[in-house]
């Protein structure tokens, strides 16, 4: 079983959000505030009917709804206009080609696309019995503009149109949260849930039965028997009935509240937090039931680098045959899990994917240790440059033009080396990223236009290649000299070179030093044309 | 026992059809079985039988009512092919015809009470049309859910119901229909569709299906319940039908079919404690907990005492079947409830039942 696509409307930041998923691993990347975590919450919600560990019916909260939609509703109602009430819709479209009868049960065309497939649909909408009450509430401007969720109801159904329950679903979904927030909520609560997930139904029943036998046996112990006899003889003034002590046999005394896990005979809670975290994750990942969905939230947050590395290996090894969705903002996680599994969430609430990346480009990024991939993906605009001196010059030129450094505008200047330009551009092309390339012409404009032919023919409107057409001025240094007088450059560099040739020779030999001085100087200088183009 | 392809099993009263349903589905553990039946009473009987033979309904078997099956597994999944406005919430049960003078093309008003309750007399037609409009999606889905669909009491399917059955017979699902045309209980379904196959004539429909190569027909004519005299009485009601034959011999002090005079009923009840059966509550019950004929369907008793209608009286007197044309099914149900003895409260003479029970006088 896997999820082909998820459709989310009205849940937190996500409106009309359509996400297609890979059969096994999916890495969702996005800047803060793009709704990454909401995607994970929504998927968990539609697959389990649970939100934050509670049945959604009892956990409806005004803040689950899209803020803009709610605000618009209140505003329109107060102007006396009619508008359909805010609602939440989450749909999971499942792949059901394996002819499993359990999935066929969920099959039908009752989804917003009228597709014939198995799937689940969760809606939180105003109960029609309370529609008038909601309308009145929203029209009255003395009420706070917080959605009155008391008027709302939850329906959770299959695409066949029939209601579903967690029990009769053929798969389970587990959310793994490394922040350990859940561990603190109750002793062993989260762990026992994970253990629960790992054990099969039969094993769980077995454990529960053994535990009951043990508790029952307590009353048969000679010591306990003697005490009960004593109680019986003494009698109890409050009642004529027989008073004994026994173990609680009711359901609230189930095994998972009494049994605790041990690591090397040490109670789990006493182990280091990092170890706890890793064990929980590995348990969840190694879960016995194959047909599971794993939702993993920012695994980089609370793990050391080596633990994270081990975890990533586990995820990769065990992801075959199950659906894994990881939300991250770590380039390490992304590179490790494969850049082709990437789903990018953009600020406008849409998802883009990176399928069709050339194999050697994929390899290149898989080996790339740094954070450059993610910088490219997450910044509003990237300016790719050939090396550190270009970077410094571009930074300074940008500040002179806009009064602040590029990063303050969400523009990232990334030094990648000219050989890697095309690889980065391939990603940028697939994701429609806004990218400027600042490159030398190296004295051969024809070679350059051929190299970037794909990006110069106008098909990629978000990509701009900036270079100078004058082959006699092939690199940065002569370009700087072209744009500025020798005298000015001499002053900036605190030199007194008598002619162009000597100055250029000096600059060529001391590239970085010169670039640093260009960056730091109080004097004003002009950026070469092709750089000026790139920082517009 | 390997399940063969589509079958219609015509099973007489007491032939062990529920047992057969249950054992067949228990023996087919590699399959997934839906048992569909008409009434909640039948569901209880089937679940009880599973309890006796298997201490419960096994995982691979689902038991459901005909309407539940139509709503959940046939209508809702592909309802959008015909009606996409709202989810079909439930069924509006109606006696007789739900609407008059509304065109079929007006889907909402023709099929629905309000906009989300589908009329009980129209749901089968809705299902058949959804199946056509979705190019067979509904039966494809059911075929993924179940390898076998057993339909119990098939003789009670009327109106568009047989079209749903035909739709299933034509799909890749193996369908087994079990029932007894003699035990059809008339319901008010004024639909003209398949009117010619109502009641005992459902046999002709089955023959048609057989001719069309949709199923084979099998008979279970041996009864574990009724003795020879009771079988003979019933068989006389159905000339041309496959005759019931008894599997056991009478072994009590009072076996067979009898007449009891009105003034001897009290004594008869005292001697034999029979279950009193009557047409409806307008008939006398002689101080006993009487059951109406149609309620007694599916039940069995050691002995029954039948309070006859005028038609039945005339039949007892003359032996002419025309007198019981309308009530033959119920009379048959009533008579075949008994293991040992059937008695009619009847004072006159009879060509059908020669024996009269008279209390001994000391």
Image (tube, grey):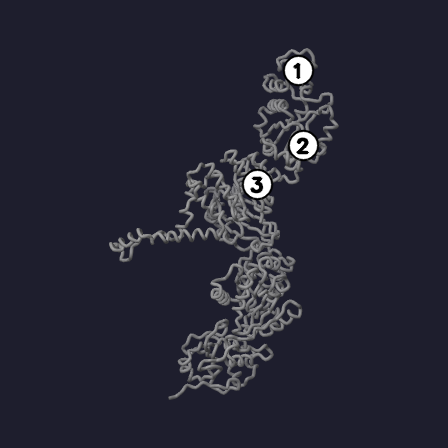
User: Is residue A78 visible in the rendered structure shown here?
Assistant: no
Looking at the picture, does residue B291 appear above or below residue A338?
A: below
* Earlier sequence position, callout 2 versus callout 1: 2
- Label 1 or label 3, whichever lies nearer to me, is 3
Q: Position of residue A385 (x, y in %)?
A: 64, 27
Mark 1 and mark 2 in contact (Cβ < 8 Å)?
A: no
User: How many residues crowd mark 2 within 10 Å: few (<14), some (14–19), many (20+)?
Assistant: some
Chain letter of disc 2 in the image: A
Disc 2/disc 3 C-alpha distance (Å):
28 Å
Disc 1/disc 3 C-alpha distance (Å):
51 Å
Q: Mark 2 points at which residue?
A: A422
Query: Do the dots labelled 1 and 3 sit on one chain?
Result: yes
Q: Is mark 3 on a helix, strand or loop?
A: helix
User: Is residue A417 visible in the rendered structure shown here?
Assistant: yes
User: How many residues crowd mark 1 within 10 Å: few (<14), some (14–19), many (20+)?
Assistant: some
Q: Mark 3 points at which residue?
A: A316
Query: Do the dots labelled 2 and 1 sit on one chain?
Result: yes
**What residue appears at the point 51 percent right and 42 percent down from the top-left corner?**
A282
User: How many residues crowd mark 3 within 10 Å: few (<14), some (14–19), many (20+)?
Assistant: some
Q: In the picture, which quadrant includes the C terminus of chain B? A: bottom left
Mark 3 and mark 1 in contact (Cβ < 8 Å)?
A: no
Query: Do the dots labelled 2 and 3 sit on one chain?
Result: yes
* Earlier sequence position, callout 2 versus callout 3: 3
Chain letter of disc 1 in the image: A
Chain letter of disc 3 in the image: A
Return the residue nearer the eye: A411 or B166.
Answer: B166
**What residue appears at the point 43 percent right and 38 percent down from the top-left corner?**
A271
- Label 2 or label 3, whichever lies nearer to me, is 3
Q: Mark 1 points at which residue?
A: A506
């Amino acid at each position: 079983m896997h999820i082909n696509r998820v459709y989310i409307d009205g849940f937190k930041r996500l409106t009309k959000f359509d996400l297609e998923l890979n059969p096994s691993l999916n890495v969702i990347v996005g800047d803060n505030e793009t709704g990454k975590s909401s995607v994970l919450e929504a998927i968990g919600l539609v697959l389990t009917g649970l939100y934050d560990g509670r049945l959604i019916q009892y956990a409806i909260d005004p803040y689950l709804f899209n803020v803009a939609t709610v605000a618009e509703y209140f505003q329109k109602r107060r102007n006396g206009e009619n508008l359909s009430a805010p609602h939440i819709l989450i749909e999971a479209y499942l792949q059901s080609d394996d002819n499993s009868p359990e999935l066929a049960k969920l099959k039908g065309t009752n989804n917003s696309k009228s597709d014939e497939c198995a799937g689940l649909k969760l809606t939180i909408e105003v109960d029609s019995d309370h529609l008038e009450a909601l309308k009145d509430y929203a029209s009255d401007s003395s009420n706070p503009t917080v959605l009155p969720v008391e008027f709302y109801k939850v329906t959770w159904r299959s695409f066949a149109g029939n209601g579903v329950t967690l029990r009769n679903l053929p798969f389970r979904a587990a959310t793994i949260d490394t922040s350990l927030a859940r561990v603190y909520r109750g002793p062993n609560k989260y762990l026992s849930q994970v253990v629960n997930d790992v054990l099969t139904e039969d094993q769980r029943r077995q454990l529960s039965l053994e535990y009951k036998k043990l508790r029952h046996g307590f009353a048969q112990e000679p010591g306990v028997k003697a005490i009960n006899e004593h109680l019986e003889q003494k009698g109890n003034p409050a009642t004529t009935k027989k008073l004994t002590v026994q173990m609680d046999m009711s359901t609230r005394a189930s095994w998972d509240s009494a049994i605790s896990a041990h690591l090397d005979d040490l109670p789990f809670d006493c182990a280091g937090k990092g170890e706890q975290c890793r064990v929980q994750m590995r348990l969840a990942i190694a879960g016995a039931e194959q047909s599971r969905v794993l939702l993993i939230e920012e695994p980089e947050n609370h793990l050391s680098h080596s633990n994270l590395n081990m975890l990533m290996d586990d995820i990769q090894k065990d992801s075959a045959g199950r659906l894994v969705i990881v939300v991250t903002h770590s380039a390490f996680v992304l590179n490790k899990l494969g850049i082709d599994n990437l789903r990018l969430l953009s600020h406008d609430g849409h998802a883009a994917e990176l399928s069709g990346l050339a194999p050697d480009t994929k390899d290149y990024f898989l080996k790339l240790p740094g954070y450059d991939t993610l910088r490219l993906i997450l910044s509003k605009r990237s300016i790719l440059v050939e090396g550190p001196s270009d970077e410094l010059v571009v930074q300074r030129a940008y500040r002179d033009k806009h009064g602040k450094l590029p990063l303050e505008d969400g523009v990232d200047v990334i030094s990648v080396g000219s050989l890697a330009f095309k690889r980065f551009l391939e990603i940028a092309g697939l994701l429609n990223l806004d990218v400027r390339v600042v490159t030398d012409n190296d004295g051969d404009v024809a070679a350059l236009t051929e190299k970037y032919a794909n990006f110069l023919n106008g098909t990629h409107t978000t990509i701009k290649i900036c270079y100078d057409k004058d082959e006699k001025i092939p690199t940065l240094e002569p370009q700087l000299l072209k744009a500025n007088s020798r005298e000015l450059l001499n002053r900036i560099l605190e030199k007194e070179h008598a002619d162009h040739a000597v100055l250029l020779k000096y600059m060529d030999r001391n590239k970085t030093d010169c670039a640093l001085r260009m960056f730091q100087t109080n004097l004003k200088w002009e950026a070469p044309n092709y750089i000026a183009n790139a920082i517009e | 026992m390997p399940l063969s392809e589509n079958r219609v099993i015509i099973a007489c009263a007491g032939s062990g059809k529920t047992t057969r349903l249950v054992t067949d589905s228990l023996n087919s553990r590699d399959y997934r079985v839906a048992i569909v039946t008409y009434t909640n009473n039948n569901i209880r009987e089937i679940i009880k039988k599973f309890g006796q033979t298997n201490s419960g309904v096994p995982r691979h078997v689902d038991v459901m009512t005909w309407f539940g099956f139509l709503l959940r597994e046939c209508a809702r999944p592909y309802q959008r092919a015909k009606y996409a406005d709202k989810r079909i919430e439930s069924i509006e049960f109606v006696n007789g015809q739900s609407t008059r003078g509304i065109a079929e093309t007006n889907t909402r008003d023709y099929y629905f009470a309000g906009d989300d309750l589908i009329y009980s007399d129209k749901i089968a037609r809705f299902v058949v049309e959804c199946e056509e409009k979705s190019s067979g999606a509904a039966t494809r889905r059911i075929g993924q859910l179940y390898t076998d669909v057993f339909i119990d009491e098939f003789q009670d399917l009327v109106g568009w119901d047989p079209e749903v059955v035909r739709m299933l017979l034509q799909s890749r699902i193996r369908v087994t229909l079990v029932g007894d045309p003699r035990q059809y209980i008339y319901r008010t379904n004024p639909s003209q569709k398949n009117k010619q196959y109502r009641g005992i004539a459902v046999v002709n429909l089955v023959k048609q299906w057989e001719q069309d190569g949709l199923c084979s027909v099998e008979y279970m004519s041996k009864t574990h319940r009724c003795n020879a005299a009771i079988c003979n009485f019933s068989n006389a009601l159905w000339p041309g039908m496959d005759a019931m034959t008894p599997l056991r011999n009478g072994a009590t002090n009072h076996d067979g079919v009898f007449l009891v005079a009105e003034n001897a009923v009290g004594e008869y009840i005292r001697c034999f404690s029979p279950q009193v059966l009557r047409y409806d509550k307008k008939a006398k019950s002689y101080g006993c907990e009487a059951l109406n004929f149609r309620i007694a369907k599916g039940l069995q008793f050691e002995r029954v005492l039948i309070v006859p209608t005028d038609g039945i009286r005339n039949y007892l007197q003359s032996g002419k079947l025309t007198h019981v044309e309308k009530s033959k099914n119920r009379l048959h149900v009533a008579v075949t409830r008994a293991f040992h003895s059937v008695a009619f409260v009847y004072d006159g003479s009879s060509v059908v039942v020669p024996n009269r029970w008279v209390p001994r006088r000391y």
